[in-house]
Amino acid sequence: QQPVSVIGAGRTDSGVHASGQVIAFDVAWQHTTNDLWRALNANLPETIAIRSLDETAPDFHPRFSARSRTYVYTLYAAPVRQPLLSRYAWHVPSRTALDLSAMAQGAARLIGWHDFATFGQPTVGESTVRRVWVARWVPRLPAADACWQEGPGPAYQFHIEANGFLRGMVRRVVGTLLEVGSGLRTAPAFAEAMASRDVARAAPPAPPCGLCLWRVSYAATPAEDT
């Protein structure tokens, strides 16, 4: 029963998911934090849940206080799509597995400080330089693996952690690395495209359905989940 402004750690494109979004707000509350947590979840729509709630310092900002963000992209290669997975994974029509080793070689070129103008536009300011700590592919079933059918083809997840991302960056990176895994370009060609700072040399962005904001970290040293 009071006006509240909510600040988020970042925006996601339409159709992109978030399992680790962080928000902050100021509110006058006379009960415990646990009571507020239960009350919020009781009133939120079914599509949103607050996993934890903590009181923070007055100067905490979910976006500008963050040290890193981690995104996970899920896709699977199969001749026939699986409708039960369509909301959370990208179906890549294929009768053969992707070259995971080649995609890993391409992803390794992302590590460190680089200008990522090839893969997106800045959300604030003009700089397109970002630092990437983690960029790796892992063979894994999607989160909805309870609905996974026999013999659909292999699934892959791309994990990337950086101090920030350009608009559309992860989806263009995934789309371009998919071309590496499909044999349409090599890992060195991927690196050359990245160095060109020309968005026209990136592949079309991967669909938003497979992308998830996995974690926003406020630790001094970013660390990847094992």
Image: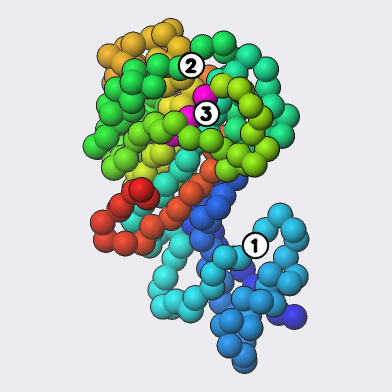
Count neighbours of disc 3 (C-alpha within 10 A) and say few if under 14, some if 14 to 19, many if 20 or more.
Answer: many
The answer to if 157 sits in the magenta stretch is yes
The magenta region covers 154-158
The answer to if 4 sits in the magenta stretch is no
Cα separation between marks 3 and 2: 9 Å
In the image, is residue 26 above or below residue 139?
below
Q: Position of residue 109 (x, y in %)?
A: 27, 26
Count neighbours of disc 2 (C-alpha within 10 A) and say few if under 14, some if 14 to 19, many if 20 or more.
Answer: some
Count neighbours of disc 1 (C-alpha within 10 A) and say few if under 14, some if 14 to 19, many if 20 or more.
Answer: some
Q: Position of residue 187 (x, y in %)?
A: 31, 16
Which of 99/214 is in front?
99
For label 3, the residue is 155
Kindly identify which numbered label has been placed on residue 49.
Answer: 1
In the image, is residue 146 above or below residue 116?
below
Which of 155/49 is in front?
155
Residue 187 visible from this viewpoint: yes
Q: Is residue 13 left or right of residue 138?
A: right
Q: Amino acid at mark 2?
A: Ala
In the image, is residue 137 above or below residue 188?
below
